[in-house]
Image: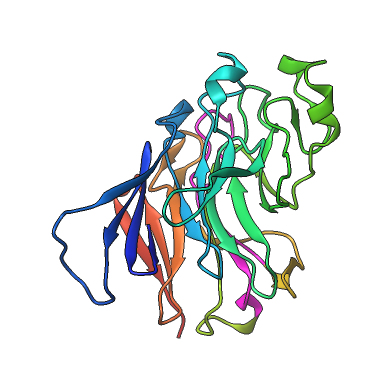
């Protein structure tokens, strides 16, 4: 969801729509306008579409995940997918802002910089420890490897020798978040409620693995930042969602993260059907 310039935008799986909106409105007439179509659905729940505006409000960005795991049904099925799309607030001027991002999700602008960051849920079926999910600052026009390569120029064995031109220019992501953690939500902490170490740092919600022999993810991690750049490794922030590792029983699965005006952190949990609030005294 996005509030921008008198409109309330909703990114559905197959479209972006907008409603007239004034601050403080609690009801609407139900009238809305579709401003852009999007590729619908996607592989293993890649139906999520996140939306954010540029800091100056002149552009909108939407994430679109891949239709498949690793383009096994042909690259032609992936048109406008595995991308971050950019367009004007009225839906015109669409272009691909960055590509090769298998399933980008949460987005936010790094404090102290003009860089858009996203969390990316990487590919399956290469074993327990490949391929790591990641968070990265997006280079405009950059290609991040999917489906031909991962973490730079490492070729995916299912596409060996294909599109070496793209493999050669694949960008190495900034932050490793662990294989199959299903890292989804992302937000920067601009508030002052938490201890100073958290100021301007990044929170990432990890939905958790579904096909790994030893569970990974199922938590919220924090990455410290300084001057708009990572200044340390990811560390556990909110844990306790795994009930029994031996049976893969879990209490919940974190997804999105958001900061309230009072400085507390909200964490959505689609398994427990709960929104958690993390505060500090």
Is residue 4 or residue 11 the one in the foreground? Answer: 4
Is residue 202 or residue 58 the one in the foreground? Answer: 58
Query: Who's the residue at 47% across and 48% down the image?
Result: 92
Q: Is residue 16 above or below residue 156?
A: below
Q: Quadrant of the N terminus?
A: bottom left
Whether the magenta-drawn stretch holds residue 213 is answered as yes
170 to the left or right of 125: right
| Residue 73 percent coordinates (x, y) | 55, 13
User: Is the image coloured rainbow, by chain, by secondary structure, or in one colour?
Assistant: rainbow
Where on the picture, by quarter, is residue 12? top left
Is residue 170 visible to the viewer in this orientation of the structure? yes
272 to the left or right of 187: left
Q: Which residues are magenta?
A: 197-223
Query: Who's the residue at 46% across and 53% down the image?
Result: 51
| Residue 233 percent coordinates (x, y) | 73, 60
Q: Quadrant of the C terminus?
A: bottom left
261 to the left or right of 194: left
Is residue 216 visible to the viewer in this orientation of the structure? no
């Amino acid at each position: 969801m996005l509030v921008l310039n008198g409109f309330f935008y909703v990114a559905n799986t197959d479209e972006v729509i907008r409603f007239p909106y004034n601050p403080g409105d609690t009801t609407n007439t139900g009238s809305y306008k579709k401003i852009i179509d999007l590729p619908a659905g996607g592989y293993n729940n890649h139906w999520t579409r996140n939306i954010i505006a540029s800091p100056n409000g002149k552009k909108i960005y939407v994430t679109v995940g891949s239709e498949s795991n690793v383009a096994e049904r042909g690259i032609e099925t992936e048109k406008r997918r595995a991308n971050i799309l950019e367009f004007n607030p009225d839906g015109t001027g669409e272009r691909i802002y960055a590509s090769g991002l298998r399933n980008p999700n949460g987005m936010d602008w790094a404090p102290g910089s003009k860089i858009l960051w996203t969390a990316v849920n990487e590919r399956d079926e290469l074993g327990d420890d490949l391929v790591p999910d990641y968070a990265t600052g997006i280079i405009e026009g950059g290609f991040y490897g999917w489906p031909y390569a991962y973490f730079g120029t490492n070729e995916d064995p299912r596409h060996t020798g294909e599109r070496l031109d793209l493999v050669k220019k694949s960008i190495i992501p900034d932050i490793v978040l662990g294989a199959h953690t299903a890292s989804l939500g992302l937000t920067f902490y601009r508030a002052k409620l938490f201890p100073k170490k958290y100021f301007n740092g990044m929170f990432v919600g990890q939905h958790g693995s579904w096909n790994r022999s030893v569970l990974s993810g199922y938590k919220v991690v924090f990455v410290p930042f300084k001057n708009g750049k990572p200044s340390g490794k990811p560390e556990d922030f909110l844990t306790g969602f795994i009930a029994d590792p031996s049976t893969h029983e879990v209490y919940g699965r974190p997804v999105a993260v958001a900061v309230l005006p009072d400085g507390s952190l909200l964490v959505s949990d689609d398994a427990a059907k709960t929104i958690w609030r993390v505060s500090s005294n």
